[in-house]
Amino acid sequence: MFAIIGLALVFISIIILIFGSIAPLLRLYFGDRSVISQLIWGSLIFILGAIILLINAIYMS
């Protein structure tokens, strides 16, 4: 279950990082139109998803 949540967070962060600059509604969702905030949010969500996947991998092995 945690692996699915972690994987979803990683995919969402990739969408934010890649498509955020061309998707104005996605950028407005985060309350700012700057690319720096988009990079920060995308990176934070990616790190959270990666940590969840690592924790799941440690406990499943």
Image: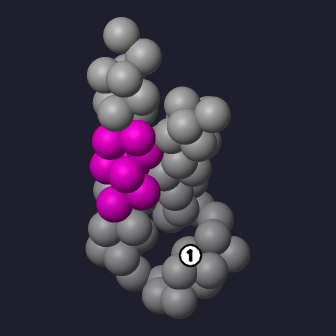
Position in image of residue 26 (x %, y %): 63, 70
| Above or below, 14 relative to 28 | above
Q: Would residue 4 be counted in the magenta stretch? A: no
Q: Of residues 33 and 8, which is closer to you in this image?
A: 8
Question: Which color scheme is applied?
Answer: one colour
Percent position (x, y) of residue 40? 31, 68
Which range of residues does the magenta coloring cover? 44-52
In this view, which residue lies farthest toward the bottom?
A: 31
Identify the residue at horizontal 42%, vertical 57% (top origin).
45
Say above or below: 49 vs 39: above
Is any part of residue 44 visible from this angle?
Answer: yes
Give the residue displayed 40% in from the left and 41% down from the top.
52
Would residue 50 be visible to someone looking at this image? no
Residue 45 painted magenta: yes
What number of labels is visible? Answer: 1
Prevailing secondary structure class for the magenta stretch in the rendered image: helix
Left or right: residue 17 compared with residue 28: left
Which residue was labeled with disc 1? 27
Disc 1 residue crowd, few under 14, some 14–19, many 20+, Cα 10 Å: some
Is the N terminus in the top left, top right, bottom left or bottom right quadrant? top right
Frontmost residue, 43 versus 22: 43
Res. 8 image quadrant: top right
